[in-house]
Image (cartoon, helix red, strand yellow):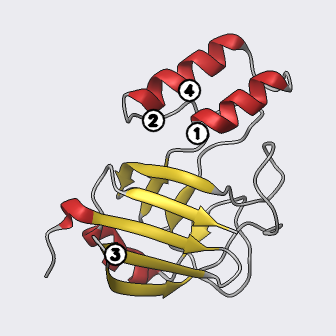
Amino acid sequence: MTSNENIRIEISKSDRTLRVFEVEKLIKTFSIALGFSPVGDKKIEGDGKTPEGSFYIFTKNSESKFHLSLGISYPSTGVAKRGLEANLISQDEFDSITKSISEKGKPLQKTKLGGEIYIHGGGIEDDWTDGCIALMDKQIEELFNLVPVGAIVEIRP
């Protein structure tokens, strides 16, 4: 097996794949489902889009209603900056998000930018989530055991 301190995840929205790497070595590829409106970057809560960009895993949830889940650090600092400039979030919300990101913690989840973006189980038949990345339950079990908190997640169009 692998030591998981150098694990990172790359997600290709267009290919509907999640690839797991240890340093530069590909160790696993999974098929995925996305948000119900998958084309384009997430802009606001409820748009059904899966965000794009660089994130990290901030938590591992074994009590998920979708079997197991890995929390993605959305919104990022860049998303928060855009949200502040567009008056979607307050200065206090911006400050909270940027502080959490700088500490590699859990960013504020309940804003007009959306939040609660996870990699979780529940199936891959269609793009059905509110913006999360879904796998088959057996696959999230494998991923859950491979990926540590703090792992980098790149989500590409």
Q: Amino acid at mark 1?
A: Ser
Q: Which residue is mark 2?
A: 106
Q: Which residue is mark 4?
A: 97
Residue at 48 percent across and 85 percent down: it is: 30
* Residue 109 visible to the viewer: no
Quarter where residue 76 is shown: top right
Confirm or deny contact between disc 4 and disc 1 (CB under 8 A): no
Q: CA distance from mark 2 to mark 3?
A: 23 Å
- Which sits earlier in the primary sequence, circle 4 or circle 2? 4
- Which sits earlier in the primary sequence, circle 1 or circle 3? 3
> Circle 1 — which element?
loop
Confirm or deny contact between disc 3 and disc 4 (CB under 8 A): no
Q: Nearer the viewer, residue 48 or 61?
A: 48
Q: Residues within 10 Å of mark 1 (few under 14, many from 20)?
A: many
Q: Which quarter of the figure is the C terminus placed in?
A: bottom right
Q: Which residue is mark 1?
A: 76
